[in-house]
Image: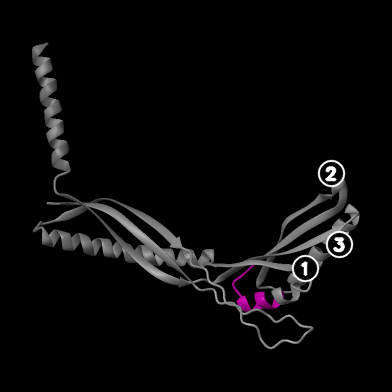
Amino acid sequence: MLRIALLCSFLSFSMLVHAEAETYNRVDFQVEAARDVTNDQLITRLSADIQDSHPARVAQQLNSALNGALKLAAAYNTVKASSGNQRTYPVYGKNNQITAWHGHGEILLSSRDFKAAGELIMQLQATLQLGAVQFSIAPATRNQIENELITEAIKAFQNRAEAIRIALGAKSGKTVHFSINNSGLQQPQMMMRSSAMSDSAIPAPEFAGGESHMTVQINGTIELQ
């Protein structure tokens, strides 16, 4: 029993020494690649609000306004339009009695063609109210830039690893582990410039989408020998 216990203790010690040897001369560090990317996608919503004493008339007028807006938007091939939130609710007066009905409906617009979106918004504002306009990087653009930044970050990681090896006087080194993290700090900006307008016309807004800062980080570990 004593010999077995001593053998187990020796094996445990050997495994511990071997584990420590495996982690010897390991260096953890981080690199990143970043780029400012022009926002190329516009997203906004327009809404209609109808109030009447009869809920049927509210629904009729609301549906008419939203259907007309979607029909108008269908003429713009580069603008995607879809239905948003829609609801009708009672308006209460004295003695908690219903005095009217209020209908609210929205349509959502998204486009990478800012000029066409501005022209459509101009027309829709004759019957709908414009909400907040947001800008972002389109998914296809984001994927492309992320792939480019990943390539740049991996090259930076390899260069940094080689610089560390030379600085520490190691003969060789290998990558033990690394992880890739990406982030996008959205910095939407909106600029609307109106052209000359008459009393009976709504000018088409001109948008400037601003930029977003995209970053890819690599956290890794190398082992030097």
User: Disc 3 marks which amino acid?
Assistant: Gln
State the quadrant of the N terminus.
top left
Q: Main secondary structure of the magenta part?
A: helix
Residue 72 in picture, x, y percent from top left: 77, 72
Q: CA distance from mark 2 to mark 1?
A: 35 Å
> Given contact means CB atoms under 8 Å apart, are the residues at marks 3 and 1 in contact?
no
Mark sitting on residue 69: 1
Look at mark 2 in the image and give the residue it sits on: 96
Q: Indicate yes or no whether the magenta region holds residue 135.
A: no
Mark 2 neighbour class, 10 Å CA radius: few under 14, some 14 to 19, many 20 or more = few
Numbered badge on residue 6: none
Between disc 2 and disc 1, the foreground one is 2
* Mark closer to the observer (3, 2): 2
Q: Secondary structure at mark 2?
A: helix
Q: Is residue 154 above or below residue 193?
A: above
Residue denoted by label 3: 61
Determine the secondary structure under disc 3. helix
| Amino acid at pointer 2 | Asn
Q: CA distance from mark 3 to mark 1?
A: 12 Å
Frontmost residue, 5 versus 135: 135
Q: Position of residue 90 (x, y in %)?
A: 83, 49
x 88%, y 59%: residue: 60
Question: Sequence order check: which comes first, mark 2 or mark 1?
Answer: 1
Closer to the chain start, of discs 3 and 2, is 3
Is 152 on the left-hand or right-hand side of 126? Answer: left
Q: Secondary structure at mark 1?
A: helix
Q: Is residue 111 magenta?
A: yes
Which contiguous range is marked in magenta? Answer: 110-120
